[in-house]
Amino acid sequence: MPFTISIPLRFGDCDLTGIAYHPAYLSMLVDVNEAMFASVGLSWKELLVDRRIGLPTVTLNLEFKRPSTYGDVLDFEVHVRAIGRSSLDLETIVSVRDHVIWTVKQRIVATSLDNHKSYPWPHDVRAGLSRYLEPLDEA
Ligand SMILES: CC(C)(COP(=O)(O)OP(=O)(O)OC[C@H]1O[C@@H](n2cnc3c(N)ncnc32)[C@H](O)[C@@H]1OP(=O)(O)O)[C@@H](O)C(=O)NCCC(=O)NCCSC(=O)c1ccc(O)cc1
């Protein structure tokens, strides 16, 4: 089961003609990442500030298929494709009215904010993220 969330395209996300400006998509993606963690009880504030676990993205592979425009509502569907020792592979599909607008494959890595090296997923984080685990060959 993927994590899903819908976000309206705001005025500030668009160019003068009302077409979505792609850097705004990246900012939305971070919000969606945060919301996915929160949906399984994993607050980024707690992870970053209290537990000092960083969550940098190390790879992003985006594909833009169609434009979206001011007033559209973007439907995000996030699939967890793999959970490694410290890595998390996500595939996010973004649609408007059932048409795919863009897709992104992303790898996030857990790090220690004390030494900025990779950090194995704690058990509770791995368990939470596993709720959305759908390996590609079973998707
Ligand atoms: C994440 C790193 C510390 C990992 O370095 P190391 O500790 O040496 O990594 P390791 O070799 O141990 O590899 C750790 C894992 O990462 C994976 N990894 C690391 N780099 C890569 C790349 N380039 N491709 C694929 N996989 C990778 C690797 O396969 C390991 O996976 P597991 O087996 O599941 O553990 C280092 O690569 C790094 O600092 N990269 C830069 C990250 C960055 O600056 N990203 C840019 C965006 S900033 C950002 O996303 C962000 C900033 C602030 C926030 O609060 C949140 C997000």
Image (spheres, rainbow, N blue to C red):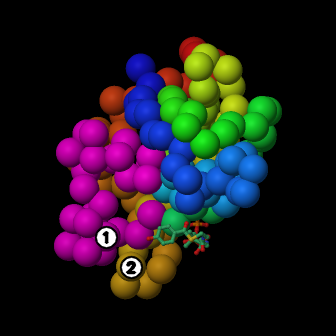
Q: Can residue 14 be seen in the rendering of this structure? A: yes
Q: Residue 113 carries which label?
A: 2
Residue at left offset 67%, top offset 60%: 23
- Residue 13 is situated, as x and y percent measured from the top left of the image, at 59, 55
Q: Which residue lies under the disc numbered 1?
A: 48
- 36 part of magenta stretch: yes
Residue at left offset 75%, top offset 50%: 17
As helix, strand or loop, the secondary structure at mark 2 comes to loop
Q: Is mark 1 within 8 Å of ligand 1?
A: yes
| Res 55 → quadrant | bottom left
User: Which label's residue is closer to the chain start, 2 or 1?
Assistant: 1
Foreground pick, 66 / 87: 66
Residue depicted at x 20% and y 73%: 50
Q: Position of residue 134 (x, y in %)?
A: 50, 24
The residue nearer to you, when weighing 134 against 74, is: 74
Instruction: Say whether residue 67 is left or right of residue 75.
Output: right
